[in-house]
Image (spheres, rainbow, N blue to C red):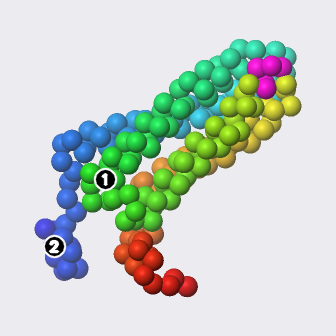
Amino acid sequence: MTAVAERAGRTAPRRLARRPRALRTVHVLLAVAWTGASLVMLVLPVAVLLRGGDAGFAVAVMGTVGNGMIPFLAVGTVLSGAALGLGTAWGLFRYRWVVAKTVLALAVIVSSVALTTGWVDAAAAGDRSVLPLLVAASVLHQVMLLGATVLSVEKPGGRLSRQRLTGNRMVA
């Protein structure tokens, strides 16, 4: 135990065992790749809008990235994060930052499936009017994914109380 933790009456934070550290590494790599692929989904429609002309290649790449790579990376990130939550002291619903991160990740996934996929298909069919919508959705996705990253680093908000989780107490 560290001297500061002893004075505060707390135990020192434990290091993750070898397996959870490997899982954390996988989780971070998947999250970084997801954020990068999402950035590609922002850069390509912006490039088409700025350059004008044929959007064929950019739309084909958006289809590959948006419909092929991002779902794998997103599901992998969420599943590895859930496994970390279940396998470590952080839990799935113990800390506000974990819950907020999960909500952000699920919001990106749902909005990608509900909106972005259809817009990429429309752009592939030649409808250039959806490109600004793709840019706006991609900016929002970047903000949410980078917000989840900040939550992971800063871990704000503290622990959720047991009473809030069980509903035994009214919360003002």
Picture residue at 78% right of the left edge, 38% below the top: 133
Q: Which residue is mark 1?
A: 86
Residue neighbourhood size for the residue with mark 1, other residues' Cα within 10 Å, grouped as few (<14), some (14–19), many (≥20): few
| Residue type (three-letter) at the residue carrying disc 1 | Leu
Examine the rendering and report whether any part of residue 50 can be seen. Answer: no
Picture residue at 53% right of the left edge, 55% below the top: 103
Tell whether 125 sits left or right of 137. Answer: right
What are the residue bounds of the magenta stretch?
A: 122-126
Picture residue at 48% right of the left edge, 30% below the top: 72
User: Between disc 2 and disc 1, whose residue precedes?
Assistant: 2
Which of the 4 image quarters holds residue 24?
Answer: top left
Q: SS of the residue at dot 1?
A: helix
Which of the 4 image quarters holds residue 138?
Answer: top right
Q: Is residue 83 above or below residue 44?
A: below
| Residue type (three-letter) at the residue carrying disc 2 | Ala
Examine the rendering and report whether any part of residue 152 can be seen. Answer: yes
Residue 134 image position (x, y, % from top left): 74, 35
Residue 82 image position (x, y, % from top left): 38, 48
